[in-house]
Image: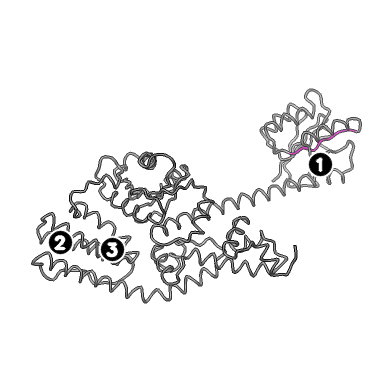
Amino acid sequence: MIKLLIVDDEQIEREGMKAILDRAFPDLIVEQANNGNMAVEMAARFRPDLVLMDIQMPGMNGLEAVEQILSDLPHIKFIMVTAFDTFNYVQSALKLGAKDYILKPSKVSEIRATVGKVLRVIENERELQAESSMQRVMLQRTLALAETDVVTQLLFDHVHEVHLNMLIEMLDIRSTSEVFVMNVIVPDGMEHLYSRIKEKVRKTRSGWVGALYDGQLPVIMFRDGQSYRSQAISLARDILSAGNTEQKAGWFIGIGNDCNSLEKIRQSYQEAIIASSNRTLPVKYRFYQDIPVLSEAVSWQQAKYLKKDFADQVRLGHWDQIKSNISHLIQAYEMEGIELQQAQQFVLKALWSIWSIISELGIEAAIPIYHFQARNYRQLRSETVNLLMNIKHSYDKHYNNLEADTIRQIKQYIMENSQQNISLETLSNKVGLSPIYISKMFKEKLGINYIDFLTECRIEKAKKMLAEPERSIKEITIEVGYHEPNYFSKVFKKMCNVTPREYRKTLLGLKD
């Protein structure tokens, strides 16, 4: 509701004006002040949207009151109320920013028209402000979803360069050619601190935060001019401060090596995972480069950490990498002189962890069990590979049956809802598969990632709408799923090599 303040030293004038306004604009909230000093005090407390200010009053006159109120509350609008012989004051008031004036005495119709005109200005400004605020909120939500998805795809899939460049520009990241990954281990029960961690990274204006999954949160950091170690330690300490004292024992951050290209970012991520595997250290962060190398072969202690990678590798279907990690485990146990029977139990636990991940994905597979005690490490390797391949067979059979129909469902959903903010998590909830797997499957089956496909759907819809001359570019922008016409035009030109306006002119045969 709009609030209005009537300022006049004559009570009969105030009451008469209030009666007129109550009848003409019953939704107004109206207060009164009988002089300039009271007007200044009430404006600070009442915070009106519009003030009807008499000019000639004892003590502080209307012009002085307007100037003082505007110095603290510049959004307030004023209509000056004056007699014919003080018209020169009106000019001064208009210079101060007054929107209009009412002469004493005035007809009721003139008062209604003058006040109504300014009230409409206030209402229009509110609508524009609300629309702008909503657009900012929607844009922030869109960028937050895009940021999470891009991190997921950078670390597990392929992102089209066009979208990366646009996101770097829109997210206002001080990007450089040097980049590294941090893997934040978030304790159980502390997931609610995700937004606080994300805000700490955002304040640096140098990083992207991925999705919190299975207690692990990947953070991609662009070098900001500090040394690599200084930047990483500073952010690690800031993130760790998000947890309270009681639960700090569960926090840990692994930091991968820095690299000079986003194409090498996955290596840094794998290093960050390994660096975060041993959480017993007194300092709750560790650089991968600080892990001691005990021998050319993978040490037994380090080999244990490799098992931590299985969750991501299974969900991605990276069975060659899983097989390689299992082989490294067995090799490490052999090199460290671990007793064969004990090594077989260790490897069996690794296979069980893989089987449990498969089961969590809803895939039925036989529980891996050694049917005999291996006589040597060669036999252990052979039987372990057989058990692993049995699990893989169940995995492949399950997803071969699902993928064809799933891809069809995803494509159909994106085409029908392309105007919405569709994230990997949205698609995950739609088809019941993990976001990482959906991203990988979509890219492998269709040759493009889902963001590219979503963009193509939006641009195709936009092309059809551009054939309708009565639709504005802004209207089309909103309807196809974007919230900023300039960004829409940039995407359209990337896809079509012409701007939307140029496309419309060519389509409709219009001349400049």
Question: Which numbered marker is on residue 321?
Answer: 3
Q: Residue at x 67, y 32 (%)?
A: 72
Image check: 100 left or right of 328? right
Query: In percent of the image, x 70 and y 33: which residue is there?
Result: 43
Q: Most extreme residue toward the right, as rendered? A: 85
Q: Position of residue 55 (x, y in %)?
A: 82, 30
Question: Horizontal and vertical percent for residue 2?
Answer: 71, 44
Per the rendered image, the range of residues in magenta is 77-83
Q: Say how the picture is coloured.
A: one colour
- Disc 1 residue type? Ala
Q: Secondary structure at mark 3?
A: helix
Q: Alpha carbon of mark 1 to alpha carbon of mark 3: how far?
A: 82 Å
Indicate which disc residue 91 carries: none
Asked if one can make out residue 242 in the rendered structure from this viewpoint, the answer is no
Magenta highlight on residue 403: no
Quarter holding residue 474? bottom right
Which residue carries the number 1 mark? 19
Q: Locate residue 303: give its quadrant.
A: bottom left
Secondary structure type for disc 1: helix
Q: Position of residue 161 (x, y in %)?
A: 48, 59
Question: For the residue carrying disc 3, how many other residues have a C-alpha within 10 Å: few (<14), some (14-19), or many (20+)?
Answer: some
Q: Is residue 488 above or below residue 114?
A: below
Name which of mark 2 and mark 1 comes first in the sequence: 1
Q: Give amino acid for label 3.
A: Gln
Cα gap from disc 2 to disc 1, whole angstroms: 90 Å
Q: Quadrant of the C terminus?
A: bottom right
**N-terminal label among 2 and 3:** 3
Identify which amino acid the numbered label 2 is placed on: Gln
Q: Is residue 213 visible?
A: yes
Separation of marks 2 and 3 at Cα, in angstroms: 21 Å
Q: Nearer the viewer, residue 78 or 169?
A: 169
Instruction: Report which residue position mark 2 lands on.
Output: 345
